[in-house]
Amino acid sequence: MSDELLSLRNQIDAVDDQVLLLLNQRARLAQTIGHLKNGIVYKPEREAQVVRRMQTDNPGPLPAESISVLYKEIMSACRALEEPLTIAYLGPQGTFSEAAAVKHFGHATQGMACASIDDVFRAVERGEAHYGIAPVENSTEGAVNRTLDLLLSSPLKICGEVMLRVRQCLMRVRGGGEGMDGIEVIYSHAQSLGQCHEWLSQNLRGVKTIEATSNGEAARLAAENPDAAAIAGEIAAERYGLYIVAHDIEDEANNTTRFLVLGREQTAPSGRDKTSLVLSAHNRPGALLELLAPLASHNIGLSKLESRPARNGAWEYVFYVDIDGHNDQPNIQSALSEVEQHCSFLKILGAYPVAV
């Protein structure tokens, strides 16, 4: 070993010693705050502010995404010193929903795999889980309608969002064949099959596809059948002992799924927020324009507008709207007061930090 290499390794060791001391100093401060509050409480706005500040002050060479991952894990470990959060997600283990939960809350949590999106909502509503993760839209396949329908009736609040780059992989059990040879059936969630349609047509034309309730369930089924494969994320391959035959098989290179973080309490402003609401327009010409006009007049950005059939009659619709800013802001409060005068129904689903 050269003297230069030895010197560099010794410097790394010295830095690691400092990092360890500072991490534990931070953990003790977090514990003190937790004791003052009778338990460390997850504060979405505070954690978003910490991550953003560290990304802004980051001199490099670590990229902003790495800074986000590191600090979320640090905060996750500090929270767990008191009591790990329980996070409900669409199971079984190995789903993209689980990956989204880990990305947002870190690894120092207790995961609760649920059989359906309905069960995710119910687990949080009953207090069996502190928070839930539910997919709401995909950049390729569009809205997840079940999540939208449940938001309409649930008392839960949206308190965060997660943007997860979806990397689809083809995987199978070891010993079932080399590569794609001998694959007779492919399991996956309906949205994942849609996201990989062109790739399947080019590489596995004619192979039977079967929809599973989730990608994790698809991986579990493939693990039981040597002639089967699954389309899922890397986390599913790890959970079920599968090997990955092909990486990144999604048709759209920037395929992204947006997940919502669901909780029972309101979230305070973080400085860069989004407010989600659902409303219903009166059934008359120009009604939707009347609803949106106050947003424009108060200089409020509109980032999403999604319609869904209402349940109270044929050809009636509700509109899901995302606007820039927190509903505690005076201009948003004024705009929503004007909107309410022109709608038959309005519900604020939550105000929360923009994904970091």
Image (tube, grey):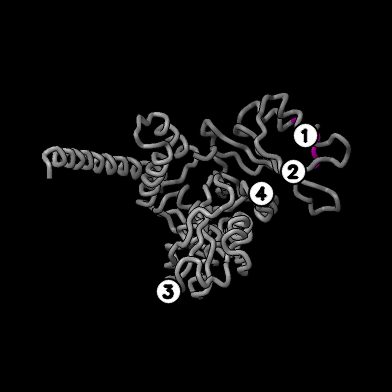
Tell me the distance, in whole angstroms, between the alpha carbons under discs 1 and 2. 10 Å
Q: Residues within 10 Å of mark 1 (few under 14, many from 20)?
A: many
Of labels 4 and 1, earlier in sequence is 4
Q: Secondary structure at mark 1?
A: helix
Identity, as a three-letter code, of the amino acid under mark 1: Leu
Q: Position of residue 152 (x, y in %)?
A: 70, 50
Vertical placement of residue 38 versus 326, above or below: below
Please tell me which of labels 3 and 4 falls first in the chain.
4
Tag shown at residue 339: none
Q: Amino acid at mark 3?
A: Gly
> Which label's residue is closer to the chain start, 1 or 2?
1
The numbered mark at residue 175 is: 3
Circle 2 residues within 10 Å: few <14, some 14–19, many ≥20: some
Judging from the image, what secondary structure is the residue with disc 2 in? strand
Mark 4 secondary-structure assignment: strand
Q: Amino acid at mark 4?
A: Gly
In this view, the mark in front (1 or 3) = 3
- Residue 159 falls in which quadrant of the image? top right
Task: From the image, state whether disc 2 or disc 4 is nearer to you.
Answer: 4
- The foreground one among 101 and 124 is 101
* Badge 2 amino acid: Phe
Residue 97 shown in magenta: no
Residue lying at 65% horizontally and 36% vertically, measured from the top left: 303
Give the labeled residue for mark 4: 142
Q: Please report the residue visible at 26 percent of the width from the left and 40 percent of the height from the top.
A: 19
Q: Which mark is residue 291?
A: 1
Whole-percent x, y for residue 61 in the image:
34, 34
Instruction: Please identify, in this view, whether the residue under mark 3 or under mark 4 is nearer the observer.
Output: 3
Magenta-tinted stretch: 338-344
- Give the Cα distance between marks 1 and 3: 59 Å
Who's the residue at 60% across and 32% down the image? 325
